[in-house]
């Protein structure tokens, strides 16, 4: 199920060359059950292309194949993963209630964030996601600053 539509069956993930002056050639194909998320296939595709010495300098993908971790992983492989950053699908962002992550300024050098009202976070914690082990960054703000905020 995805946005109210459901599928039964399989998905094919195709990789092709797209140089302007040469024929387009499919260099890799992966078939999965329909329920497998596209983001779960980015790394296996890159691994197969690496093993076959076909990894491109730039891999152009749609939003289904990107996450922050995948952008970093591609960089470590010596290639650029080029595609839109994942959108914020949290309820607050969808319904325009409260704030979403784009409303905050991240100060990476000082490991802090600044809220829309201009207040700096007081804690920055790097953790692992409890379900899948993905790196998660948690930033905390003072209730003194958050409680009176109009949103």
Image: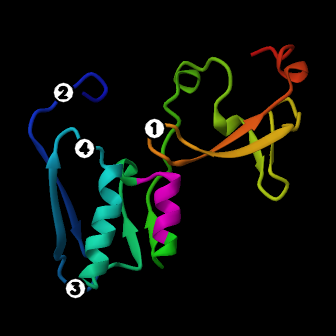
Q: Earlier in the sequence, mark 4 or mark 1?
A: 4
Left or right, residue 102 beside residue 16: right
- 71 w.r.t. 140: above or below: below
Task: Report x, y in % for residue 106.
Answer: 75, 47
Left or right, residue 117 beside residue 5: right
Left or right, residue 98 beside residue 65: right
Quarter assignment of residue 44: bottom left
**CA distance separating discs 2 and 4:** 13 Å
Left or right, residue 41 beside residue 109: left
Task: Report x, y in % for residue 139.
Answer: 74, 38
- 138 w.r.t. 96: above or below: below
Residue at 73% x, 44% y: name it. 125
Q: Which residue is mark 1?
A: 131
Q: Are marks 4 and 1 in contact (CB under 8 Å)?
A: no
Neighbor class of circle 1 (other Cα within 10 Å; few <14, some 14-19, many 20+) is few
**CA distance separating discs 1 and 3:** 44 Å
Q: Earlier in the sequence, mark 2 or mark 4?
A: 2
Q: Which residue is mark 4?
A: 36
Q: Which residue is mark 2?
A: 6
For discs 4 and 1, the disc positioned in front in the rendered view: 1
- 149 w.r.t. 135: above or below: above
Task: Report x, y in % for residue 66.
Answer: 43, 53
Task: Report x, y in % for residue 134.
Answer: 51, 48
**CA distance separating discs 4 and 1:** 17 Å
* Helix, strand or loop for the magenta stretch, by majority: helix
Q: Which residue is mark 3?
A: 22
Neighbor class of circle 4 (other Cα within 10 Å; few <14, some 14-19, many 20+) is few
Q: Which residues are magenta?
A: 66-74
Identify the residue at the far left of this view: 9
For discs 1 and 3, the disc positioned in front in the rendered view: 1
């Amino acid at each position: 199920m995805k946005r109210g539509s459901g599928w039964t069956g399989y998905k094919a993930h195709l990789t092709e060359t797209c140089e302007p002056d040469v024929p387009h050639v499919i260099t890799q194909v992966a078939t999965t059950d329909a329920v497998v998320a596209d983001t779960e296939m980015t790394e296996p595709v890159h691994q197969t292309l690496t093993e076959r010495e076909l990894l491109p300098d730039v891999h152009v993908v749609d939003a289904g194949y990107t996450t922050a971790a995948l952008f970093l992983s591609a960089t470590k492989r010596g290639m650029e993963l080029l595609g839109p950053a994942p959108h914020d699908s949290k309820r607050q962002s969808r319904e325009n209630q409260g704030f979403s992550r784009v409303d905050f300024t991240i100060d990476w050098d000082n490991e802090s964030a600044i809220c829309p009202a201009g207040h700096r976070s007081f804690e920055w914690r790097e953790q692992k996601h409890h379900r899948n082990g993905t790196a998660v960054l948690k930033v905390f703000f003072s209730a003194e600053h958050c409680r009176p905020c109009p949103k």
